[in-house]
Image (cartoon, helix red, strand yellow):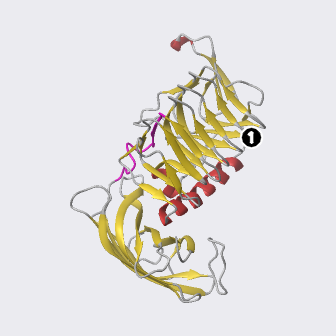
Amino acid sequence: MKIKYWILLASMGLAALIRGPSPALAQVSLGTAQSFAVLGGSTVTNTGATTITGDLGVSPGSAITGFPPGTVIGGTIHAADAVAAQAQIDLATAYNVASLLPCFDDLTGQDLGGLALTSGVYCFSSSAQLTGTLNLVGAGLWIFQIGSTLTTASNSSVLGDFGQDCNGANVFWQVGSSATIGTNTQFVGNILALESITLNTGANVSGSALARNGAVTMDTNHVSVCSSGGHPHGAIKVTGGGQIPVPDPNSVDPKATGTGRATFGFNAKPSKAGGTAASGEFNYVNHVTGLHINGSVTTVEVIAINPDGSPKTVRFSGTCRGSSPSCSFSVTVEDHAEPGIIDELGIVVAGGPIEVRSQRVISNGNIQFHGK
């Protein structure tokens, strides 16, 4: 049964009604894709003086064009490397989670312009259109499930006062095909599109533009990831060693475990200069397939925190040594305190040899966060 409530927006001086369901909602996690302001599946192209605050990437495609004149602030460009590949895996998970949440208010056929919506799950069986202003009222989580396309008219806007640095942190637009953000639109939220995303001239996004399969096309835009910059939680030193379960016989399913084993050892230490630059070593052997990765760590960052503010998930990445063709790796780890029996590790290797193992509880060993 749909639960709705209507309250006159007298205090705001508007003739509209506040509309919205008020169920408890599960959080949608972007995982490692959280640090990306822009992520494309096939290509990323830009025209004009676009500014990206956060990471910029593409995978499995490799082409990123238009930077310069576009600039990236507080982030890194990841073109077809392991970091971008892992971000695409996490984007797919977030997209699926958002799409499967129960819809509490069907807005099919209605224009979002002129509406004032409290937190909740809103759905469109086909396309969604925004002409004018959409007000997001109060606090909480907004999820828009759109069956096909999302389109905004020129000079449209999404407004809200969420009490945080980036207004789009808790707004998700799950788009079943492609999104087109019109000229000079001021948009809020994380766009999770199955196909492509187009940001027309002067459109700005407080959130992210994440395309699973297609291109992200930009023209003189500002896109600021919802984390006060691309790397909101800093960096810490992490060390560890042990093993994780892998499928035997081998499987390309990234979530598959099994009776096989892969051993690992690593140390990743942030640079004294700050940012995400790091030094260290990573060694990984899949004893089922014989894959052996040995490489240098180049970045480390905290990508998720616990409710008490302590680091929850750390990602470090780097380049393989002695691999032909060359490859890169991205590893996510979690330290759940001693004795380490529920610590977690996931790995993506891309470029030459390929290995994708989603984050899982280690079967032996220990992972440590230093300076928590």
Say above or below: 332 vs 309.
below
Is the stretch drawn in magenta largely helix, strand or loop? loop
Q: Is residue 118 left or right of residue 77?
A: right
Which residue does the image show at 54% across and 48% down from the upper left?
44
Q: Dividing the image into 4 quarters, which one contains the N terminus?
A: top right
Say above or below: 238 vs 24.
below
Q: Which residue is mark 1?
A: 148
223 inside magenta stretch: yes
State whether residue 3 appears in this view. Answer: no
Relative image position of residue 261 (x, y in whole percent): 55, 86
State whether residue 150 appears in this view. Answer: yes
Q: Dividing the image into 4 quarters, which one contains the C terminus?
A: bottom left
- Identify the secondary structure beneath mark 1: loop
Badge 1 amino acid: Ser
Extent of the magenta region: 220-233
Which residue does the image show at 42% across and 52% down from the upper left?
307
- Quarter of the image for residue 154 reads top right
287 inside magenta stretch: no
Out of 13 and 55, give the one closest to the viewer: 55
- Quarter of the image for residue 367 reads bottom left
Relative image position of residue 287 (x, y in whole percent): 54, 89
Relative image position of residue 60 (x, y in whole percent): 59, 61
Say above or below: 250 vs 60.
below
Which residue does the image show at 63% across and 15% down from the upper left?
16
Say above or below: 189 vs 72.
above
Relative image position of residue 234 (x, y in whole percent): 32, 55
Out of 183 and 263, give the one closest to the viewer: 183
Q: Residues within 10 Å of mark 1 (few under 14, many from 20)?
A: some
- Quarter of the image for residue 235 reads bottom left
Out of 341 and 349, give the one closest to the viewer: 349
